[in-house]
């Protein structure tokens, strides 16, 4: 039975790490998309306010 306990514990650790990695991926994606929008708004502002 101890081997089954070890397997179960390893599986729990793997799931916890996978959840953590997934959370980090979503935060990275959120910051990336937010940054893309900031760049787009700055470019739009620059084009609209460029000297003619």
Image (cartoon, rainbow, N blue to C red):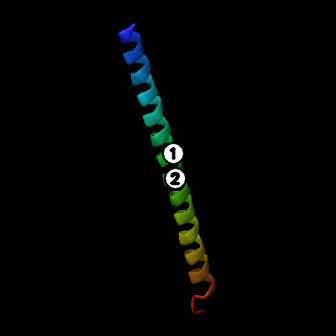
Residue 13 numbered mark, or none: none
Residue 14: quarter of image: top left
Q: Looking at this view, is 45 or 8 the one in front?
A: 8
User: In this picture, is 26 found above or below 7?
Assistant: below
User: In this picture, is 22 found above or below 36?
Assistant: above
Q: Give the structural element (helix, strand or loop) at label 2.
A: helix
Asked whether the beta carbons under mark 1 and mark 2 sit within 8 Å of each other, the answer is yes
Residue 3 appears left or right of 33: left
Q: Looking at this view, is 52 or 3 the one in front?
A: 3
Q: Say which residue appears at 53% left-offset and 48% top-offset.
A: 26
How packed is label 2: few (under 14 Cα within 10 Å), some, or many (20 or more)? few
Residue 47: x percent and y percent?
59, 81
Q: Residue furthest top?
A: 1
- Cα separation, mark 1 vs mark 2, equals 6 Å
Q: Say which residue appears at 51% left-offset and 45% top-offset.
A: 23
The residue carrying mark 2 is: 27
Residue 40: quarter of image: bottom right
Q: Looking at this view, is 2 or 33 the one in front?
A: 2
User: In this picture, is 18 found above or below 50?
Assistant: above
| The N terminus, quarter of image | top left
Q: Say which residue appears at 46% left-offset and 34% top-offset.
A: 16
Q: Give the structural element (helix, strand or loop) at label 1.
A: helix
Residue 23 numbered mark, or none: 1
């Amino acid at each position: 039975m101890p081997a089954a306990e070890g397997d179960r514990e390893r599986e729990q650790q793997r799931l916890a790490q996978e959840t953590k990695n997934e959370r980090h991926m979503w935060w990275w994606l959120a910051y990336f998309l937010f940054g893309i929008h900031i760049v787009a708004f700055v470019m739009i502002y620059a084009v609209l306010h460029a000297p003619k």
